[in-house]
Image (tube, rainbow, N blue to C red):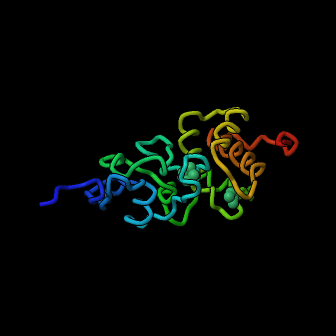
Amino acid sequence: MRGVTSEDPVPVTIELNGRRRSGRATARTLLTDFLRSELGATGTHVGCEHGVCGACTVRIDGVAQRGCLTLAIQADGRKVDTVEGLSDRKDALTVLQQALHRNHALQCGYCTPGILMSFSDFLAHNPNPDEQEIREVLGGHICRCTGYAGLMKALIEAASEMRGEPPQISDSELAT
Ligand code: FES
Ligand code: FES
């Protein structure tokens, strides 16, 4: 009788956006593929699959990580948060999402879920970032539509608003 091999799917259970979800994955299944194909959570995008573009970023136990560099079985038993779970309500956007919307900081939107997940983690741990720190985090993401100026403005505004301050940025500050 043939034993279990690395190609045989095994059960994987995660807490996805606060809900316990189970599926099956082989030893090689990426977390991104598990989320999208097995659990139907297609909000997480897949770009390079090499850890470069950041499109696949999710939060695992609260920490932003590349979904394409994580095996599904590594996430077993852990909390995974994706863009679908950012807002408490389906018909409401978070402060961060509103800032991107207000500043036209998404065009095709391919990079957007990953950027939202990175910055939701970043701002939770660093509520008062300077512009250079924001640039460094944004530097971990590729926006193929090159919407970086709008993204910078949105991220600075969101950080300010989350501190209870009015937005304090001028377009001249964003000259690149
Ligand atoms: S798809 Fe994961 S970093 Fe590009
Ligand atoms: S908005 Fe198109 S890739 Fe960023």
In the displayed structure, 67 sits above or below 123; it is below
- The location of residue 18, given as percent across then percent down, is 37, 54
Q: Quadrant of residue 126?
A: top right
Count of labels in the image: 0
- In the figure, is residue 155 to the left or right of 73? right
Q: Residue furthest front?
A: 1
- The location of residue 34, given as percent across then percent down, is 39, 59
In the displayed structure, 135 sits above or below 72; it is above
- The location of residue 139, given as percent across then percent down, is 67, 41
- The location of residue 59, given as percent across then percent down, is 47, 46
Q: Quadrant of residue 5?
A: bottom left
- Please identify the quadrant where the C terminus is shown: top right
Q: Residue furthest left?
A: 1
Q: Quadrant of residue 130?
A: top right
Q: Residue at x 68, y 55 (%)?
A: 100
- Please identify the quadrant where the N terminus is shown: bottom left
Q: Residue at x 82, y 42 (%)?
A: 174
Foreground residue among 78 and 2? 2
In the displayed structure, 2 sits above or below 129; it is below
- In the figure, is residue 143 to the left or right of 17? right
